[in-house]
Amino acid sequence: MHTAETSAKKKKNPSARVTLQLNVEPEVYKTISNMAKTAEMNIQLFVTQMIEKQLVANAGNDNPVAARIQAKHALDEPVIATVKQMVEAGEFDEHFILRVFQKLRKDQTFLANYEAASRQQHVSLNRHIVILIKSAAKAKNKKGEDGEEIRFRIKGELITSYTLLEKKG
C-alpha cells in the first residue's frame, strides 16, 4: 500500500521499494499464478514484470523510467540462461548468487545493460537479479541453526552482500 510514510522513505532512499497491494478475483489470481509457474517465475516477479511491460509499452520514447526498465529486462534472459547453464554443469553451490554475478560480470553487453538499468540504484537491481537467480535455479535461502538466513558481505563485486542458497525440496 502506498502511503505518505512510504513517500518520505523513498525520498531518503531512492532504491527503496514501494509495496503495492492488489485485489483480484480468485480466478484471476489462479490464472496469473499458473502463468507465472509456466514462465518459471514466482508470482511477485511475474506481476511486477507485467506492470513494467505495460509502462514501457505506454510511456513515451523519452521516458527515463521506461528506458531503465527496458535495460533491466534486457538482463533477464542472460541471467536466466547463465543460471540454467551453470546448474546443468553442476556448478550450483551455496555461494551460487556470487558465482552467477561473477560470471555475468565478464559479459560486456550484460555490464552495459546493468549500468543503464541501475542508474545508481544497484541494490534494487541486484534484488531483482537475485530473485531471477533463485527462481531459475529452483533455490531458496539457506538458514543457520538459529533459523536466520546466512548472509555474506563482500567487496570488489557487483554485489556487496548475498544470502547463501540451497536447492528447494
Image (cartoon, rainbow, N blue to C red):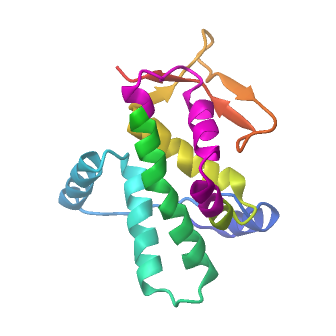
Looking at the picture, how far across and down is residue 96, in whole percent?
55, 28
Write the residue at 60% across / 47% down: 127
Magenta extent: 86-114
Looking at the picture, how far across and down is residue 24, in whole percent?
29, 63
Nearer to us in this view, 150 or 22: 150
Quadrant of the image occupied by residue 152: top right
Quarter in which the C terminus is drawn: top left
Q: Is residue 20 visible?
A: no
Nearer to us in this view, 42 or 137: 137
Q: Is residue 72 left or right of residue 102?
A: left
Write the residue at 65% across / 67% down: 116
Quadrant of the image occupied by residue 145: top right
Q: Is residue 166 left or right of residue 11?
A: left
Write the residue at 44% across / 61% down: 48
Q: Is residue 121 left or right of residue 71?
A: right
Quarter in which the N terminus is drawn: bottom right
Instruction: Name the main secondary structure of what is drawn in magenta.
Output: helix
Write the residue at 63% across / 80% down: 64
Quadrant of the image occupied by residue 144: top right
Nearer to us in this view, 77 or 27: 77
Q: Is residue 68 visible?
A: yes
Vertical order, 149 against 126 (above or below): above
